[in-house]
């Protein structure tokens, strides 16, 4: 009988997703050492895809609205495969994942709920595995600052980013390949990095950064730190030189690249940089994330010499993070290139967590307000902001289960209910 208890408990945990998915989320995080925990988290992600609000009350210009409309149009057009496949490698469809997925689902239904559920299946798999890559290396009794960093890591690219499914699904696929390769020297996972440009064409850049690191970059922290700091404070780039360099790219990539380097896109990017299109809360969140990451990465690069002598795998991850972040800082000066800083933050935050776990800072559990600890505590601001953003993609059906949620039509984000309470 004793042998049956673990399997019975595991079956009960899996059944929780059919009763109350929020309970499954709690079980997966509270018992993250259990073998089924990451799969429970994955199932919860799929549920969030089922209840994702794609046509919110009040309208939206987000990518998810366009994806939902494309599915409806695809279903109505009922294109044959030959007609559809002719479009795949035009300048408009360099990325294969999103249009192919939309086309295949459109053969059977025009309901975007199915589309976002499938998006969540793929996104959630890689997302859950990347999160547990870190959780599997964290002691159960870690201190508070480590858990703040873990929460930040979870929310760098959360499940509601299926609203911009191409870029952010590619992020987790790339990390799924790169993290174990860099940290554990597992070459079998590199194939996933090579697949990411088919999800979003811009990951040719990420793949190039990874290959340059593998072939040319020595694992020397101080030179890479100096490179990182010099690019961090860079504030201008000659776009004409960038456009000239793009002439050497293949034609099907040049067409897509040109979309992001038009004068209109440059002006839009300048507005984005100054924050005129964002509210103060989001601007403050990005400011805190940017500077806290810079201070913390600089700190572990300088103060971690003895640590890296003992843990060469951590040294590799820090070096890769510094190099990837450096190139991302340069890409961030190009329209839409700033999104690669988010990719950099994933690797950098993993480095920070593993560093502070290894050094066992504040092992007594008390928070001492050193500058480093203060930077980590400031990350609570972007954590809360990201959770608030997530409230814009889910309604009251978040409290349902998969069977009842599928029957409900829920287009009112729960953030609107909170706003009404304070009016």
Image: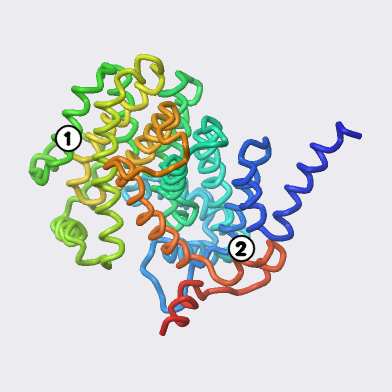
1 or 2: mark nearer the eye: 1
Q: Is residue 341 above or below residue 358?
A: below
Identified at 66% across, 67% down, the residue is 400
Q: State the SS at label 2.
A: loop
Compared to residue 359, the image places residue 128 above or below, namely below
Image position, residue 30 (x, y; %): 62, 46
Q: How is the image coloured?
A: rainbow
| Residue at the outermost top position | 309
- Identified at 49% across, 72% down, the residue is 413
Would you call the spot at circle 2 few (<14 residues within 10 Å), some (14-19), or many (20 or more)? some
**Regarding mark 1 in the picture, which secondary structure is present there?**
helix
Disc 1 to disc 2, C-alpha distance: 50 Å
Question: Can you give x and y, in whole percent of width and height, for residue 291 in the image?
Answer: 24, 46
- Binning the other alpha carbons within 10 Å of mark 1 as few (below 14), some (14 to 19) or many (20 upward) gives some
151 to 212, vertically: above or below: below
Residue 196 visible in the current orientation = yes
Q: How many tags in the picture? A: 2
Q: Nearer the viewer, residue 69 or 315?
A: 315
User: In the rendered image, which residue does mark 2 sit on?
Assistant: 109
């Amino acid at each position: 009988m004793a042998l049956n208890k673990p399997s019975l408990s595991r079956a009960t945990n899996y059944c929780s997703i059919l009763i109350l998915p929020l309970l499954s989320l709690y079980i997966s995080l509270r018992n993250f050492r259990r073998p089924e925990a990451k799969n429970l988290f994955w199932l919860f992600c799929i549920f969030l895809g089922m209840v994702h609000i794609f046509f919110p009350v009040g309208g939206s210009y987000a990518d998810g609205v366009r994806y939902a409309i494309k599915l409806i149009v695809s279903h109505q057009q009922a294109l044959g495969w030959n007609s559809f496949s002719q479009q795949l490698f035009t300048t408009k469809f360099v990325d294969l994942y999103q249009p192919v997925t939309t086309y295949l689902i459109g053969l059977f239904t025009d309901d975007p709920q199915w589309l976002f559920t499938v998006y969540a299946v793929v996104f959630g798999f890689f997302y859950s595995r990347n999160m547990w890559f870190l959780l599997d290396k964290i002691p159960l009794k870690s201190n508070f600052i480590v858990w703040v960093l873990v929460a930040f890591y979870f929310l760098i690219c959360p499940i509601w980013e299926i609203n911009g499914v191409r870029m952010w699904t590619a992020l987790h696929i790339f990390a799924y390949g790169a993290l174990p390769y860099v940290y554990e020297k597992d070459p079998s996972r590199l194939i996933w990095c090579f697949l990411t440009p088919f999800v979003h064409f811009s990951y040719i850049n990420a793949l190039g950064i990874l290959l340059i690191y593998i072939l040319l970059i020595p694992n020397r922290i101080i030179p890479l730190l100096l490179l990182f700091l010099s690019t961090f404070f860079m504030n201008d780039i000659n776009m004409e030189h960038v456009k000239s360099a793009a002439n050497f790219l293949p034609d099907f990539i040049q067409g897509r690249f040109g979309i992001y380097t038009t004068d209109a896109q440059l002006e839009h990017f300048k507005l984005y940089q100054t924050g005129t299109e964002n509210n103060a809360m989001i601007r403050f969140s990005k400011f805190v994330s940017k500077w806290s990451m810079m201070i913390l990465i600089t700190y572990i690069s300088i103060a971690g010499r003895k640590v890296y002598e003992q843990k060469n795998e951590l040294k590799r991850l820090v070096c890769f993070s510094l190099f990837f972040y450096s190139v991302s800082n340069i890409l961030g000066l190009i329209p839409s290139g700033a999104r690669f800083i988010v990719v950099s933050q994933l690797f950098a935050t993993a480095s920070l967590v593993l560093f502070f776990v290894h050094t066992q800072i504040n092992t007594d559990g008390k928070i001492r307000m050193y500058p480093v600890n203060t930077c980590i505590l400031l990350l609570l601001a972007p954590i809360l902001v990201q959770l608030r953003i997530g409230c814009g993609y889910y309604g009251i059906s978040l409290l349902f289960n998969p069977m009842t949620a599928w029957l409900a039509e829920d287009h009112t984000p729960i953030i609107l209910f909170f706003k009404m309470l304070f009016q």
